[in-house]
Every structure is written in structure tokens, then in C-alpha cells.
Amino acid sequence: MIQIPKPITLPHFKLAAKTTNNLSQRLQSPPTMFRRFLCRASTTTMRSWRRPFSTDLSAETSADSKFVEAWRKAIPNVEPPKTPSAFMATRPSTPSSIPSKLTVNFVLPYSSQLSAKEVDMVIIPATTGQMGVLPGHVATIAELKPGVLSVHEGNDTTKYFVSGGFAFVHANSFADIIAIEAVPLDRIDPNLVQKGLTDFTQKLSTASTDVEKAEAQIGVDVHSALNAALTG
Amino acid sequence: MASNAAAPFWRSAGMTYITYSNLCANLLRNCLKEPYKSDALSREKVHYTISKWENGKPQKPTIRSDTPEE
């Protein structure tokens, strides 16, 4: 979303000497060049405020400054609009020492189960297997499969059965876990799980089309994961 | 571009990720204990009206109350 630049009050031709407002004092260029260079958050201050030694921010800033340079060359009278990256908070820098706790945000489409909770470890059911995430974990994006998510805080462990989703671990020890449906294990009915498992195993053997086979296979996967969660 | 990973079985069967994940979520909801199960299923109910258009005019709308069961 580009911010529409405010109309400039200065006239467009060489009357810089005649401007009576304070803007004339802020003109950095000589009066013959009537380019107005306002120091606003959208231009240099934002860029210089970004931490200089974050190695992963350089791409963003150079793209922004190239745009600003090109704009100034083409349209010197109008202040460059803010690019979307000017509205985004800068990516938090990777701290130099590993933090002692992992901050977890665990959200569902209809509610937020954990919001910026500081924990010691979470074990997430990624498609590549159970993944333990500790503070200082490398930045990762993991797709989740139906399985158990466990949150370890001191001596307490909270377990949820997650139907699927994604987990994003950031370099600064923040983890965002997004699930479509997640329930604490005690809300699962073992009888329904068993019944579902036998139903789908039967459907799998009688399935004929690809779609039916896929659906039956998914059913078997989910119910066996539920079974394992309840017994394990 | 070479494909990096073999497609998951549901993708090769023609199912999209959204269909797959919604299916998994529904299967999970159907295995819940009673008060939670009816809460979850009622939360996921969708109601909408559809009007088909013909010759630039909307026809009579139909109301669909779609339960999340497959």
C-alpha cells in the first residue's frame, strides 16, 4: 500500500527565495534546486535506525534506498511514497547470546491457545518426525502432521493433539505454531477413535478410485495418530 | 526446475492441501468427547446463500446451511 504523498506547498518553479514558511530552512540543497528533502520517518531516519549489524536486513534496506534514489531522480518535487517495507516492523535481530526461554504463540483459527508464553521446549509433530524446539533453535518452517504437540515448562508438560498446520521458528527464539484444530488429549474419546480406525481400515481395503483411497488413507493416518497419542 | 520432493499421496490423488487439512480437522472433531464435539461441530457450521447469474441478472438465491460432515 503506497501512501499518497501530501501535496507540496512550495511552488514548482524557482521561487525558493520567496518561501516564507520554515521549510526554507530545512532545504538542504541550494536554493536553485527546489527539491525539498524532508527528514521524515519514511526516509533516512527509518534506515539509520535499523540496527547496523543485523546481517539479515541488508536486502530490505538496499531495495528501499534504490527505490528512493530512483524516485528522487525522476520526480524531485514530490516526496517518495512509503513502500510497504516502511510500514513493517523490522525483523527482530538475532540476539548474540541464546535466550534462556522460547516464546511460543500457538494459535487456532478461532482462538489463541498460547500467546507469547515463555517455555523451555516444545515438541512439534512435523511431517519429518517429532521435532524438539529449544531456545536458540535454527530458524525453521515445518509443516505439521496429525500428532501430539507438547509444551514443556519447568516440570509441567501440556499436550495437545494437533490435526495439522505449520510451525515457524524464528532466529530470535520465537515460535509461531498455527494449527487448524487442536485439542488437549483428555477431550478425545477412545471409543470413537477405535471405531474410526476400524471403519477407515475397512474403507481402505474396499476403496477403488484414487480419491477414495486417499481419503481412506488420511482417515487411517489420523486415527492411528490419535490412537498412538492416547496410548503413548 | 526439478521437483524437490515426491508429492504426498493426497496431492497425487488430486486433493489440494486445504481439502486435506480440513479433512484431518473434521476427523479429529468427530473423535471428541461429547460437550466438546457438539461445540466444535456447531462452531464450524457454515451458512450461505447462492444466487446463480443468467444473462447478467441474478436468479432466485438459495440458502445453504452446510454442515461440515463430508
Image: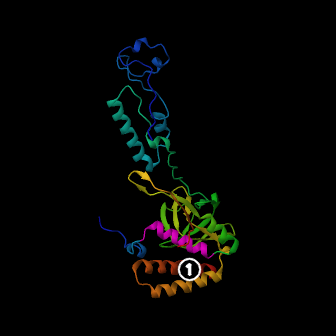
Where residue A169 appears, x then y in whole percent?
Answer: 52, 60
- Residue B66 lies, in percent from the top left, at 55, 66
Residue at x-position 61% and y-position 60%: A110
Q: Is residue A196 above or below residue A4?
A: below
Q: Residues within 10 Å of mark 1 (few under 14, many from 20)?
A: many
Chain ID at mark 1:
A
Asked whether A84 or B25 is in front, the reply is B25
Residue A124 drawn in magenta: no
Left or right: residue A19 compared with residue B65: left
Q: In front here: A166 or A208?
A: A208
Residue A172 % position (x, y):
54, 55
The residue at the far left in this view is B1
The residue segment tinted magenta is B15-31
- Where does label 1 land, which residue? A223
Judge whether residue A71 can be spotted in this image: yes
Colour mode?
Answer: rainbow
Q: Secondary structure at mark 1?
A: helix
- Counting from the top left corner in percent of width and height, residue A141 is at 48, 62
Image quarter hosting the C terminus of chain A: bottom right
Q: Main secondary structure of the magenta part?
A: helix
Q: Residue at x 35, y 33 (%)?
A: A71
Quadrant assignment for the N terminus of chain A: top left
The answer to whether A80 is drawn above or below residue A117 in the figure is above
Asked which quadrant contains residue A227, the reply is: bottom right
Q: How many discs mark residues in the rendered view?
A: 1
Residue B28 colored magenta? yes
Identity of the amino acid at label 1? Answer: His
Q: Residue at x 41, y 73 (%)?
A: B8
Q: Check the image and name the residue furthest to the top.
A: A18
